[in-house]
Image (tube, rainbow, N blue to C red):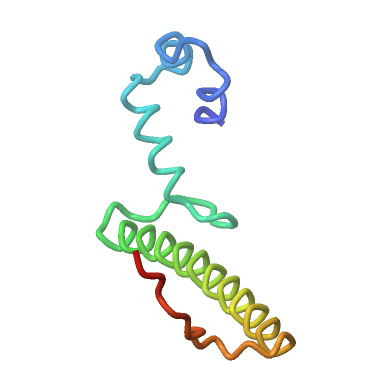
Amino acid sequence: MAVERMGNSENVGVLAQELGVTRRCLYKWRIKLDLVEPGEESARPNTHESSYRKQTQQLKRLLGEKTLEVDFFKGALQKVEARRQQSGVSGERAFTTRSRK
């Protein structure tokens, strides 16, 4: 609740005094709360495990984005290939003579 109030407070120092804690303590609580995944009730212990989990989440998100990009480009390539087949163009370069200057 303190961290929630901190987000709505204009002056964190005044809030800290009101709660009887230091500003630094409030910021530490906010950092720990950021490490909690939705559905968890308390922060994980301060270990390398929490940073690995956070990094894993970021990598999973990036992998998802890249998968979407690949799917998009595969679909676009399929459309281009379908248009070539409809128009009878093989994708080869046409032979043209060069103009002489």
Q: Quadrant of residue 101?
A: bottom left
Residue toward you, 90 or 61: 90
Quadrant position of residue 12: top left
Q: Is residue 80 left or right of residue 21?
A: right
Quarter occupied by the N terminus:
top right
* Extreme-left residue of the structure: 48
Q: Residue at x 48, y 85 (%)?
A: 95
**Residue 87 vertical position relative to residue 99 in the rendered view, above or below:** below
In screen coordinates, is 46 left or right of 3? Answer: left
How many marks do you count on the picture?
0
Q: Position of residue 65 (x, y in %)?
A: 51, 64
Expressed as whole percent of the image width and height from the top left, the position of residue 81 reads: 63, 85
Residue lying at the far front in this picture: please name it. Answer: 101
Q: Residue at x 35, y 20 (%)?
A: 23
Residue 84, image x, y percentages? 66, 84
Residue at 42% from the left image edge and 50% from the top image edge: 35
Q: Residue furthest right?
A: 86
For residue 23, above or below residue 85: above
Q: Nearer the viewer, residue 19 or 63?
A: 63
Q: Is residue 82 above or below residue 48?
A: below
Query: Which residue: 41% across, 70% down?
Result: 99
- Between 39 and 70, the one lying in front of the other is 70
Give coordinates of residue 43: x percent, y percent. Answer: 43, 50
